[in-house]
């Protein structure tokens, strides 16, 4: 919730915990580590009004349709592919 607020200025409410992914290597460096990525299903507290493709920090953001994501029409992070494979994103 804090990261979403920090990165986008949006507030959310956690609905449920999703699968946790264990990594043995850092994705960016390949360094051996023991890392756990915790995932949550959340819902925005308020709908997005006056959509702007840039968030409050000037970073480009976009909403991706889950069906398009599953068809790999948009690049997504490996941990999102993990959640699709686990059936957490459907």
Image (spheres, grey):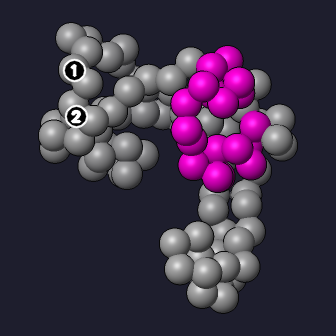
Provide residue 37's location: percent of width, then percent of height. Answer: 63, 62
Q: Classify 10 Å Cα crowding around label 2: few (below 14), some (14-19), many (20 and above).
A: some
Question: In the image, what residue occupies the spot 60% across and 25% down?
Answer: 73
Q: What residue is disc 2 on?
A: 55
Task: Compare residues 89 and 12 and report the one nearer the observer.
Answer: 89
Q: Nearer the viewer, residue 47 or 67?
A: 67
Residue 18 lies in quadrant: top right
Give x and y (percent) for residue 45: 40, 24
Q: Identify the residue shown where x is 67% and y is 38%.
A: 16
**Is residue 9 at all visible to an observer of this figure?**
no
Magenta highlight range:
66-84
Q: CB atoms at circles 2 and 1 under 8 Å apart?
A: yes
Q: Residue at x 63, y 20 (%)?
A: 68
Q: Which mark is on residue 52?
A: 1
Between the C-alphas of marks 2 and 1, the distance is 7 Å
Q: In the rendered structure, does residue 71 fall within the stretch colored magenta?
A: yes
């Amino acid at each position: 919730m804090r990261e979403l607020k920090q990165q986008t200025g949006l507030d959310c409410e956690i609905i449920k915990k999703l699968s946790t992914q264990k990594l043995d290597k850092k994705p960016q460096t390949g360094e051996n580590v023991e890392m756990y990525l915790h995932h949550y299903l959340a819902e925005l507290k308020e709908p997005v009004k006056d959509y702007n493709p840039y968030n409050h920090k000037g970073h480009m953001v976009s909403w991706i349709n889950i069906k398009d994501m599953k068809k790999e029409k948009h690049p997504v992070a490996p941990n999102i592919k993990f959640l699709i494979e686990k059936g957490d994103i459907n």
